[in-house]
Image (cartoon, rainbow, N blue to C red):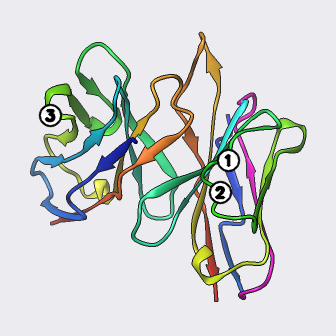
Amino acid sequence: AQSVTQPDIHITVSEGASLELRCNYSYGATPYLFWYVQSPGQGLQLLLKYFSGDTLVQGIKGFEAEFKRSQSSFNLRKPSVHWSDAAEYFCAVGANTGFQKLVFGTGTRLLVSP
Amino acid sequence: EAGVTQFPSHSVIEKGQTVTLRCDPISGHDNLYWYRRVMGKEIKFLLHFVKESKQDESGMPNNRFLAERTGGTYSTLKVQPAELEDSGVYFCASSQWTGGMNTEAFFGQGTRLTVV
């Protein structure tokens, strides 16, 4: 069965510092991978996705993620965090045939300190 | 273009009452999904519509939950009777088929349901 692990429940980063959020997945075939963000009072917004090809994918708001098949990981990174990045981040995996059903991790809440 | 819209944004009901959540997907999206997040846990799939047909309802918790999508447009999720453990945030999402594959899902802002 598919599963997603986000080992960090909370992370605090200073504004301007770099960020890496961890995501590990379990899936038997080539996965479709996603990162979503939920800002306070907002819905889930897609940051980026990996379907195939280049394993380093660029997303919105300056985020990027790298797919590493050997480590079953899809970590999210940002070189310099802004206070507006404070939110909850969700990693998800979808079935290869059309990802009609997303399996989410438990989320990582990012706090940004001044 | 309007995104996925959910009503209401918040609902507080007493145990045993009935609540109906509504989702309006992005126009033209045949696929509609319901997900739920109970406090502190992961977001979990409930069911998937393709147009008006239920494609996969394997995530529905029990028969107190009824989802409909009449006419293949908006969808409703009814909880009757509500129990305390039904509290959580209910998300709706939609996607479309393009070029023989599914696009990513676009999510609404969620409905926060509190059963007291």
Q: Of the numbered discs in the image, which one, if any, rests on residue A71? A: 3
Query: What residue lies at 90% left-to-right and 38% top-to-bottom?
Result: B71
Q: Which residues are magenta?
A: B14-29
| Label 1 Cα crowd, 10 Å radius (few <14 / some 14-19 / many 20+) | some
Name the residue that disc number 2 marks: B60
Name the residue that disc number 1 marks: B57
| Residue nearest the observer in this picture, A33 or A48 | A33
| Residue nearest the observer in this picture, B102 or B8 | B102
Q: Position of residue B13 (x, y in %)?
A: 72, 83
Evaluate if marks 2 and 1 touch, with contact meaning CB atoms under 8 Å apart: yes
Relative height, residue B25 to residue B99 (above, below): below
Query: What residue lies at 35% left-to-right and 46% top-to-bottom?
Result: A3
Distance between the Cα atoms at labels 3 and 1? 32 Å
Q: Position of residue B112 (x, y in %)?
A: 60, 70
| Residue nearest the observer in this picture, A114 or B111 | B111
Amino acid type assigned to the residue bearing label 2 in the image? Met
Q: Quadrant of residue A33?
A: top left
